[in-house]
Amino acid sequence: MAGYDRGRLDLPFVGFCTFAKSPICSDWDKIDADVAVMGAPFDFGTQWRAGARFGPRSIREASTLFAFGHDGAYDHEDDVTYLADARIVDIGDADIIHTDTVQSHANIEYGVRKILKAGAIPLVLGGDHSVNIPCINAFDDQEPFHVVHVDAHLDFVDERHGVRFGHGNPLRRAAEKPYVTGLTQLGIRNVSSTAKDGYDDARRMGSDILSVRQFRKLGVDAVIERIPAGKRYYLTIDIDGFDPSIAPGTGTPSHGGFTYYEVLELLEGLTRRGTICGIDLVEVAPDYDHTGGTAILAAQLLLNVIGRMLYHRT
Amino acid sequence: MAGYDRGRLDLPFVGFCTFAKSPICSDWDKIDADVAVMGAPFDFGTQWRAGARFGPRSIREASTLFAFGHDGAYDHEDDVTYLADARIVDIGDADIIHTDTVQSHANIEYGVRKILKAGAIPLVLGGDHSVNIPCINAFDDQEPFHVVHVDAHLDFVDERHGVRFGHGNPLRRAAEKPYVTGLTQLGIRNVSSTAKDGYDDARRMGSDILSVRQFRKLGVDAVIERIPAGKRYYLTIDIDGFDPSIAPGTGTPSHGGFTYYEVLELLEGLTRRGTICGIDLVEVAPDYDHTGGTAILAAQLLLNVIGRMLYHRT
Amino acid sequence: MAGYDRGRLDLPFVGFCTFAKSPICSDWDKIDADVAVMGAPFDFGTQWRAGARFGPRSIREASTLFAFGHDGAYDHEDDVTYLADARIVDIGDADIIHTDTVQSHANIEYGVRKILKAGAIPLVLGGDHSVNIPCINAFDDQEPFHVVHVDAHLDFVDERHGVRFGHGNPLRRAAEKPYVTGLTQLGIRNVSSTAKDGYDDARRMGSDILSVRQFRKLGVDAVIERIPAGKRYYLTIDIDGFDPSIAPGTGTPSHGGFTYYEVLELLEGLTRRGTICGIDLVEVAPDYDHTGGTAILAAQLLLNVIGRMLYHRT
Amino acid sequence: MAGYDRGRLDLPFVGFCTFAKSPICSDWDKIDADVAVMGAPFDFGTQWRAGARFGPRSIREASTLFAFGHDGAYDHEDDVTYLADARIVDIGDADIIHTDTVQSHANIEYGVRKILKAGAIPLVLGGDHSVNIPCINAFDDQEPFHVVHVDAHLDFVDERHGVRFGHGNPLRRAAEKPYVTGLTQLGIRNVSSTAKDGYDDARRMGSDILSVRQFRKLGVDAVIERIPAGKRYYLTIDIDGFDPSIAPGTGTPSHGGFTYYEVLELLEGLTRRGTICGIDLVEVAPDYDHTGGTAILAAQLLLNVIGRMLYHRT
Amino acid sequence: MAGYDRGRLDLPFVGFCTFAKSPICSDWDKIDADVAVMGAPFDFGTQWRAGARFGPRSIREASTLFAFGHDGAYDHEDDVTYLADARIVDIGDADIIHTDTVQSHANIEYGVRKILKAGAIPLVLGGDHSVNIPCINAFDDQEPFHVVHVDAHLDFVDERHGVRFGHGNPLRRAAEKPYVTGLTQLGIRNVSSTAKDGYDDARRMGSDILSVRQFRKLGVDAVIERIPAGKRYYLTIDIDGFDPSIAPGTGTPSHGGFTYYEVLELLEGLTRRGTICGIDLVEVAPDYDHTGGTAILAAQLLLNVIGRMLYHRT
Amino acid sequence: MAGYDRGRLDLPFVGFCTFAKSPICSDWDKIDADVAVMGAPFDFGTQWRAGARFGPRSIREASTLFAFGHDGAYDHEDDVTYLADARIVDIGDADIIHTDTVQSHANIEYGVRKILKAGAIPLVLGGDHSVNIPCINAFDDQEPFHVVHVDAHLDFVDERHGVRFGHGNPLRRAAEKPYVTGLTQLGIRNVSSTAKDGYDDARRMGSDILSVRQFRKLGVDAVIERIPAGKRYYLTIDIDGFDPSIAPGTGTPSHGGFTYYEVLELLEGLTRRGTICGIDLVEVAPDYDHTGGTAILAAQLLLNVIGRMLYHRT
């Protein structure tokens, strides 16, 4: 983040749009950071509206609103200045090949591997939820982890009409990995694209599934208690886990979703409970939300999570 | 609903937009269904923004998001697959005559009578709230029923400047019918178009009026208790009963409205408490909501209500 | 407000857009009213999106929805008809000089002084939050008052790169006034533009700061209790104090904000607790919200507050 | 129009939106002007999109762009300052009654009669094209005139399903009047709502019909030559006569329409050829054009026509 | 098309959205028509904006504007009623498989083969321009034809990063077919995605390339003269061949494009010069054009072309 | 520009948005390029709509459409591959200080001076037209030049209400400079913000003023002939010089403007006639054009002008 003492005011509307106005790292063999941000603008995996290919750009632009000039972000509720010494870099986007899902996914996997190799935490900006598949693949030589999943949809379809790598399949693909020790799937609700057998499979393969109403009834603390403590967590956030009132810019909105603070408090709890080893935030399709609110939500959430994640580590 | 085993994937963005991709029934003398859907694209009864004439099309299009391929909609909270064997048909739209309220309303009434004659439950997609008037008229040879009304506005104006059939009048017109045994009016709030005398009349004519805050204070179960048990219910939903955060695409938005689950839980309770004999959902004006969220809300709610209504009957 | 008995129906979409269809008072030396509304369409003080210059027009237009024909607004929850004999005038806009912050602010101050001189309560429609600065300036020969501030941001920056009169500075400027006896700042949250030292200064200068979550935990009654009783209150409402779900049309949206009723109940409490001596509502940038909902929120809130303010005055 | 010497800058975005910031004349018995502007926000006559009810407001707002401060509008091509001493008043809107075409049209007619009685030229802002019917009716005690009609559609349907006063009927209704001496219909093109018999009737009843391409082939001077010289002209402009590239905000756009200067040069020629006795401009539906361009077109055209009309009168 | 004498007015905003309100033919083995319309909602081949998957729906909806009730479309310039006895059917959409270009293209090819087998002329609504590839493939057992191509881009890339079936490749793929006797590529302009070698290849493989300015300099008649006479023509129209002023709702707009009449006159000439054996119109991405104008352009053009094509055959 | 042989496809929607995906030069003392691009996101000088502060970002994003992978842009009409070896750098934005016109302008001037000192041609992306003032100021130690101005408005107001540096003043300020040898002002039309005396002053101070119609009547070659040959030209392009049909996203649109090729041909002629020493393109306000077309126009024009400028130099 910029600091006013460096000579410029750099208002949010001024300057290039990297994530949180972080420095660019173009040489992927020289990543040196706590968190490395990569875009994965792939959206051929969508089943209704496309447009998540513009998600990374929109989140980067929105993040400028929260990135001007304080050498950190003071939160008066916590009385903490987060992000003051965060080392975040933006490495740009994975190369996407139109018409070609396999190669595009491979390129995303390649970028995440580079980040992991550098010892940084990958933060991947989707793209549709299928980009989670190569993200998880890239961890095959890492320590095991538990997946925490925020979404309206279970995304646990095994195969349908030959499709195994679309945006309805990622959590199934993740659950199949030997290094994924379990899943917590939150926000799942109502009319879904996964049929009953998908839910049965998920539970059998180690998933704890909670709807928004179940989450609310339990309360955020009890939900966090259900997540294994002291573990490494991979966090995958489909923006449609949030309510369409604050996240209309997405491919398949589903009413009855989370509010901002419900998810922030969950994730803050997670940063205290163990170690976040990777994050993807997907399905922001900005052209369906001319208010910009969906991308602002993604940026605001991510900056708060990164701040807390870095503050609570060690 | 489609089934994947019938040879096609039929993603939501593929194919014609009938309600929930139901079969079309063009011959109104051969309706054979549990539920028959008809559009009533009339909006000359509006007092601020028009545009509800495109409500039926937008709800049909949005309903495709919830209609792909599972032979039913599995709800993991209830552990029920709804709609698996639902017999829904879409009979198209009532004929609307520009400049002519009387004839347009007559055509709507005609369609509802055809549905009733076939023994199906009419689901009418407005159009503005005045289309409720011919809907109710069509029931004059049916068994009596209680009206359940979700709305921001009381819509109980008797007559103003000669207007008796606009979108501020329908509940008054309904209350006048001998076969309407009572009304429950929910969500009514704040600055309204009905003056004090309208409220007095409503209460005198058998209406139980609750605001959103009163509804919340009582809780959904207590509200359902106030509705006479074991009756036939006609359900009329003005989308502006919902909060503008999720239903901005409407003619006269009013802040402080219902959330999605508040209304879903109310209506689920209703499907358990008696028999729904007719539904209209009105005032979706899609061109005021480029996110599509308002039409998605209407479609998501209706499919859930139909599913529960058919599941709980008998 | 119009009355139907005066011969016209005057639907909301008919006629000129003054605030609540109030009479225009062009001669600022002849203001005779309880409340005088003035626009302050200045937005050079914004740090991200501009566009609040169109706030006054949009709020006036939206207010027509709530201003048709009842000789007052009946609220069935309170069983009161508010605004029946309210004397509101719309005096138009302060003259804004492009490129020139100092002169534009002076012109706003000039208008507020005229209103105060006439003994009316000024209601200023922004414009960005910097317009609060000349509003407060205009009270330098009035009785002292307490400032009640609804906002996502503290707006307590003293000076940055020479800027002292931007939209991040107003509450600091207010706190410096000898006739401002204290401040209650509500809704302040999350990533903010004011750094830690600003919060420290604010508290030292007499501010009581509460976030949305703190407000909710306390409850509205307890919050009102924290505001000194029996005082004169100046009310400054940044529309971004509300949640972006209902107020996306603003310069710097911040997720996690107030709902409509939270603020209405707070302000209703305030009208009972003391005397409101001035109001500004700022940062409505209508072109970022094509649903119109943000301007509708502003208009709906203001009309309810004015109604209660006039009803509860002795 | 304002003048800078009167003490205020009054930028376009500042102040109330009357047409060209003209004075309001609320007492329709005291109209004293060259041109009196009245809105006719009626749109129940539309056959596809509604929304022209917001036409008057949008044109008034757009007109502020052309109305700031010069004591007239200097045109460097003509080396003339138009409008310097134009006496324009804005009398507000005709009262519209939802659901009731007959009464709404009667109220429009009433307003036009008041303007004519005052000796002013009526400029009516629609609303849909059906509002031309009561406008023409109001001239039944005036001298005869020739109708000049700019439109994509012939609007010459006699009756269809009982409809005689919709937006497809006005020119037929006009042609039936004894005081309408002839019609020139320009811009008529392509797929239209009037069938062949309508065209035959039009020609038989005195209409000269030209498409855009025929207009271009002839040239504007030759087209003007076809209009009877030295007559009184009533000018009715459907904004869809223009190309959708500049007038997308309308109910039934038709590609292949006029450019701005084609119509301006036609109308300038008309102001030199005879006397314009009345104008309506209809079918601006602003909510379909978020750029504002359609309303800007209407305002820019009207101000230029009024300027030339007043300049060339003797 | 509907006829008023069949008892309903069926205004454009009323009823289901098939192309031109044509009858649906769901059984692809029983197509019996002059023209059979099929949607191909595939857009994974795009290189900038996606969204053409909603092209078929938007064109169908827009086509209702031109399809109401006259038993044909009278064109006063030609004094012909087109389409009066046109036998058009709408067979719905090809099945699209997300993530899978090969299978989606195969499904499109399957549908076109069914139409050809039935002896009807296929009219395919894209989707991105890559859908032209399976369309052309389906003609491999038909008589040879000449391709007439309207586009901003040459789309003649052979292979890039392995991509051979994206929206930059179709005309190259077509030119490779033995049954494609030549190509006329019109509207090609300015900054393009095909590099110099692609142009060289195109010319060598039989293409006649003209920019918009070259087209205008020659005039439409001379352009038509350059197309081999008396042949079968396959017509592929990328909507971005038109100017962005009338076709902004597309993936890769390019300024300086065709007007409506330029293309209509070209295509009318073509219907006189030989036989049109197939049509695709691609790259309408409606969510980028909230005015609806792009889809209206597509529908207006297609209905006029079909009318002329059927009128001039034999 | 990228080249495919460097290992990535880098589709337009992939990667950071610098102008034409040029390298970033953050150290303004080490600019080494033919053309250096700087944003000037200042819009407090606007008199109607603001929003040009987002112009630089929008143009950069749009420029990615024209910047993918060919090692130059082949133009088949000219048979030239432009930009193949162009050395363009993007130096980011001038620092803007909200509320402070003087300091913001000074910061813009500072950046242009840095570019000039490096011997590069400055390309400044506005921002409103007032940013031209500091741009011209920065040339005070350079060789004299002639100003070529494309705009709807003359922008020649000397002073009004104290304003001398707003967006209505820049050409007046330029004309006052001793090193500005003359002005050619093109596209000036219709209702303008400059009064008659401004035109008189302009002509007296060396300006040649032509409207769009006058430009068309003369033809582009004759217009170029009127510009002094063999000179240095500073080019200032207000996007509202173009027609609102292709440039609606601007503060003060004016109908009847230039088409794309009219301006491109003019500027191409200019690149042949002398040396372009600086360019600014201003008044792109992207949030008023959701189609993106205005920013695409700016980017397409600039890339073509730069290509030709570099090709024709020597």
Image: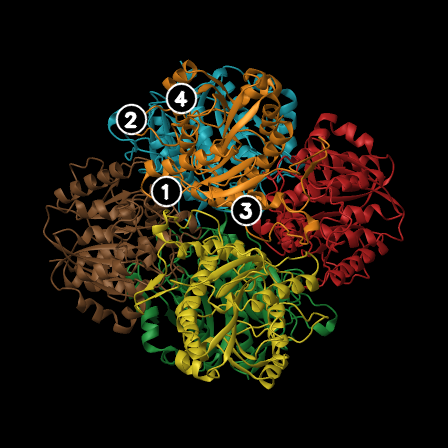
Chain colours: A brown, B yellow, C green, D red, E orange, F cyan
Judge the density around disc 1: few (<14), some (14-19), many (≥20) Cα neighbours within 10 Å. Answer: many
The reply to whether dot 2 and dot 4 touch (C-beta < 8 Å) is no
- Nearer-the-camera pick, C216 or E162: E162
Q: Which residue is the site of mark 2? A: F4
Q: Which residue is the site of mark 1? A: F95
**What distance separates the C-alpha of mark 1 from that of mark 3?**
48 Å
Q: Amino acid at mark 3?
A: Glu
Residue C146 location, x and y as percent?
Answer: 43, 74
Q: Chain of mark 3?
A: E
Q: Is residue C180 visible?
A: no
Per the image, label 4 sits on a secondary structure element best described as: loop
Q: Which residue is the site of mark 3? A: E61
Q: Chain of mark 4?
A: E
Q: Amino acid at mark 2?
A: Tyr
Quadrant location of the N terminus of chain C in the rendered image: bottom right
Mark 1 or mark 4: which is in front?
4
- Nearer-the-camera pick, C65 or E50: E50
**What distance separates the C-alpha of mark 2 from that of mark 4?**
27 Å
